[in-house]
Amino acid sequence: MWRKRILEEIARADVGVLLITQEFVQSGFIRREELPRIVGRAERGEMELLPVLVEPAEWEELELASFQLTPGRPT
């Protein structure tokens, strides 16, 4: 039920704010289900995407290379 709702909300969103943590990076559900949909919509101009790095994380391996990453906390 919650998976379906998350994907429905991604499909309707005008703005996506991704709070990047190491747990976010390691989440299989996020990497397989959410991130491809969000990035795809943003690349097609269907939503604005703002990835925010809130703690040190190995985010470089994610599909976010074409988006400006915003530092959320000083390191």
Image (spheres, rainbow, N blue to C red):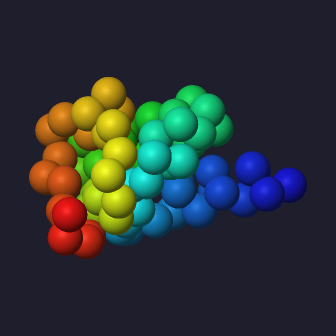
Q: Is 73 situated above or below 11?
A: below
Work out whether 3 lies above or below 48. above
Along the line of sight, which residue is nearer the eye, 8 or 57? 57
Image position, residue 28 (x, y; %): 61, 33
Q: Is residue 16 visible in this depiction of the protein?
A: no
Tell me where residue 69 appears, x and y as whole percent. 19, 54
User: Residue reaching furthest bottom?
Assistant: 73
Q: Quadrant of the rendered structure where residue 72 is?
A: bottom left
Quadrant of the snapshot with the N terminus: bottom right
Q: Measured from the top left, where is residue 43 in percent x and y?
A: 25, 41
Confirm whether residue 59 shows in the render. yes
Camera-side residue: 21 or 16? 21
Q: Quadrant of residue 51?
A: bottom left
Q: Which residue appears at 13% of the width and 52% of the height?
A: 68
Of all residues, the one furthest to the right in this rendering is 1
Q: Name the residue: 19% across, 70% down.
A: 74
For image coordinates 54% across by 48% down, the residue present is 23
- Is 71 on the left or on the right of 49, as rendered? left
- Report the side of 14 relative to 10 (left or right): left
Q: Quadrant of the C terminus?
A: bottom left
Name which residue lies at 53% across and 56% down: 10
User: Measured from the top left, where is residue 64 in percent x and y?
Assistant: 26, 39
Residue 17 vs residue 70, the one in the foreground: 70
The quadrant where residue 36 appears? top left
Query: Where 27 sits versus 14, above or below?
Result: above
Label tally: 0
